[in-house]
Amino acid sequence: MSDLTHLTLAEARDGLKRKDFKARELADAYLAAIEAANSSLNAYITVTADKAQSMAQASDKRLQTGDTRPLEGIPLGIKDLFCTKGVHSQAASHVLDGFKPDYESTVTANLWADGAVMLGKLNMDEFAMGSSNETSYYGPVTNPWRRAGSNQSLVPGGSSGGSASAVAGFLCAGATATDTGGSIRQPAGLTGTVGTKPTYGRCSRWGIVAFASSLDQAGPLARTVRDNAILLRSMASVDELDTTSVDKPVPDYEAVVGEGVKGLKIGIPKEYRMDGMADEIEALWQRGIEWMRDAGAEIVDISLPHTKYALPAYYIVAPAEASSNLARYDGVRYGLRVPGDDIIDMYEKSRSAGFGAEVKRRVLIGTYVLSSGYYDAYYLRAQKVRTLIKRDFETVFAEGVDAILTPTTPNAAFAPGEITDPVAMYLNDIFTVTVNMAGLPGISVPAGLDAAGLPLGLQLIGRPFDEETLFRAGQVIEDAAGRFEPENWWA
Amino acid sequence: MTVHVRDAKPDNLIKGATGDWEIIIGLEVHAQVLSEAKLFSGASAAYGGEPNAHVSLVDAAMPGMLPVINEECVKQAIRTGLGLKAEINLRSVFDRKNYFYPDLPQGYQISQYKQPVVGEGVVLVDIGEETIEVGIERLHLEQDAGKSVHDLHPAMSYVDLNRSGVALMEIVSRPDLRSAEEARAYVTKLRSILRYLGTCDGNMEQGSLRADVNVSVRKPGAPLGTRCEIKNINSIRFIGQAIEVEARRQIAILEDGGTIDQETRLFDPKEGVTRSMRSKEEAHDYRYFPDPDLLPLEFDQAYVDALAEALPELPDEKKARFVEDLGLKPYDAGVLVADKATADYFEAVAAGRDAKLAANWVINELLGALNKADKTIEESPVSADQLGAVVDMIADGTISGKIAKDLFEIVLAEGGDPRAIVEERGMKQVTDLSAIEAAVDEIIAANPDKVEQAKTKPGLIGWFVGQVMKATGGKANPQAVNQMLRDKIGTE
């Protein structure tokens, strides 16, 4: 049965349609795999086995009658940041203890409406703040990948570490994730999976616990480019409950997968070639450039001059918004309440106990940069930088560049506790934050293994709402690089 | 601070031990927008209801919830801006004002900070015979907070979120007011404009309209003094009292050689004092920043023009029309337009009738009677039709003015058709000369000495008229009686 879990999402979908197996069998195979693996990987916070089985049975009925929907019977894992009705939805935070919403996020509602099956809620960095999935209240997630010949466990990246680990470890056919500064693409890069951060406004944010509202965007994480294309089509929608969602038709992304990049102009930004970047990353990038050229793309050198300001500006804007978004976790209405002598004491005790160190750090940074006397120097300045970063991209796209190719991360997966300096940790997002700051779509595709046998990813950045070009170009990388699966040591 | 300074009239100055003091007042009025739903959620904005009955997921700030602007509230703000002759900003921005409070579920209030939807405008306020201009600095939209209830549990507080997220318009005046009377008149006028527009019900007892009052004092001509803000006053009378009390408090401190601390104060109407709520040092740092959940609020001029087109006639325009077209005195016109229902009542009475006569009856008799009975015009026991019939009967000579007052009292107390009452109770004016003549002759015959005096002193004719009127039960036509007496006595 376990071989069912190794099917890609597209293969599983086609197999179900051909009635090679039942949705219930597929769901059970994943539930068994989770049961066997979760104590090692800690990818799931909650497994919704009953729900999965009843949803799968409903899918089987439809598959029987031929009344099938695009994701009929496909078992998915859902990042804990998404509110799911009656199910643990805590953003992996202690402060939301016991919170089970009586509403369903728009993105997950879209997935269920298209026939997908819910396996459970996936671990993540608390409130999506982190790049290693070490900040979860539910403990760190382990990467299914290990260095060759080593038993040292490694981080899966973050914040969608549970999503990445579950996809890489065959614990779901695909997963939802969110990306505020790289939280889909960086863990995809570190786990040999494919992750897409769509254009800001492509997916509704309604029902997703907010981290930084102007940067947050939901997206898929799965084993192939095609699987990402399939998932995004179901996840994306305009939503009258989210006025920042955009009313544009959602294309059939899967239809363009395989169209190649012939005649496309791929930009290579010189500012992403950083001092001290590992040779392996540089080599990987070169290989990607060759693959694009071999597939008929024109390679052009481009400049994105404000890139170096992106990370510092991001670490002003995102914490500022977070400090305000997280104010509602005050112990008054839901979640954790630690009694106090008076209301202020109750706030202080509840929030002190409820938030982890990284969340506190960002709330403090955010509060500081918005305070009177500092607003202009920090927040306002960062917003100006943001405009300049956006303009950098607009300029190269106006010059005819169709997509931009960069590494996803400056390094492969690392060990828990290996990076303790917050700023060093933030540097993991150096190639990905610009995309969020500019609201653009980006995808990370596995492109090879490093000397230690760990996966590395390449990132493609596209024009606003041109995810199709990313899937076309991403498939070229996938075809050239092949797919990467970790050796199963966990079950 | 740039202020175009209005000098106080001399009788508005407060006499202190060291000379005269001038009060400088500016108001921030919070007016609840009349709308079905809240500013950013579909929950009902109705007053009252069981605690927490009108609360959506957004109002309770559940995780992952997002605000969606209610277009009706935006329209109401624009209409109000137009009514205040103000600049309408085609692009404005919603900001978050961050602070912690149990009845503020989001931990921030969505408001407008640097770019409000309405800019500078003006309100004309009648103070007796004088009209003053009060500058409007801005109007912005913001969410109301919920309510903490402290008296239901010995150690805990309860929170009612029914009001949480209800749309408010904050209307900020320039510091153009110089006395408690002016401040009261300004709020009264502003409330009148809002009610005419139908953008706020102006119900202060229910908290639909409340004011923060900024007060400072100075010697006439001196630079502006340090101001204190008196928060959340919900009656026009209390606004006046708070200003008086606060001005005198500040003057006493200054005359004792002290200085005023900039602070937020609360007015205690029972004790008649203001008390410090928080000092400048304790003031919140609200960390305003643009709300990333909401796009800037944008609309075009055509949208504004369409709203302007559909605007009702406002008090100032109505007053001008009453004066110019109907010939009313400006003061009377002002009294009638202050309340839209009164103006509507008056227009119903005046339609097709002598407008000045109608105005006199509405102002002197009807409003007087309602005031005595503590009733609103909507509760008037005398309808416009009934009063119109009374006025008609005066105009066509059916009844005398004096009888009309009696008739009015009857209609007020008992109701009924005024014409039928006049008919049934024999109140018609007697214009039949032969009927009057008998009474006249009788009075002349009974008072020969007065008749002699009256021949040289025509003023005495009035006494005879009175006697005849008394004898006829007030029903004789006074003009006819007067003429007949002059003829018979032979007054020079």
Image (cartoon, coloured by chain):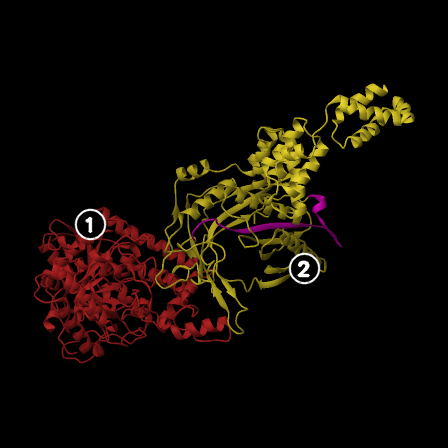
Chain colours: A red, B yellow
Q: Quadrant of residue A228?
A: bottom left
Q: Quadrant of residue A254?
A: bottom left
Q: Is residue A437 visible?
A: yes
Residue under mark 2: which chain is it in? Answer: B
In this rendering, the answer to whether B488 lies above or below A63 is above
Task: Assign the C terminus of chain B to one quadrant of the image.
Answer: top right
Could you tell me residue A467's position as x and y percent? 20, 54
On screen, residue A211 versus residue B96, left or right, reads: left
User: Residue sitting at 11 percent across and 61 percent down?
Assistant: A64
Could you tell me residue A187's position as x and y percent? 23, 67
Q: Amino acid at mark 1?
A: Val
Q: Quadrant of residue A173?
A: bottom left
* Secondary element at tag 2: loop
Considering depth in this image, is B421 or B452 the residue closer to the camera?
A: B421
Q: Is residue A114 magenta?
A: no
Q: Amino acid at mark 2?
A: Gly
Q: Are marks 1 and 2 in contact (CB under 8 Å)?
A: no
* Secondary element at tag 1: loop
How crowded pointer 1 is (Cα within 10 Å; few <14, some 14-19, many 20+) is rated as: many
Q: Is residue A276 visible?
A: no
Considering depth in this image, is A417 or A236 the residue closer to the camera?
A: A236
In this rendering, the answer to whether A148 lies above or below B364 is below
Residue that protrudes farthest toward the right in the picture: B449
On screen, residue A191 versus residue B113, left or right, reads: left
On screen, residue B136 versus residue B432, left or right, reads: left
User: Residue sitting at 9 percent across and 54 percent down?
Assistant: A295
Tell me the tag on residue A401: 1
Residue under mark 1: which chain is it in? Answer: A
Tell me the tag on residue B272: 2
Considering depth in this image, is B392 or A464 the residue closer to the camera?
A: B392
Which span of residues is magenta-colored?
A: B9-37
Could you tell me residue B80's position as x and y percent? 49, 44
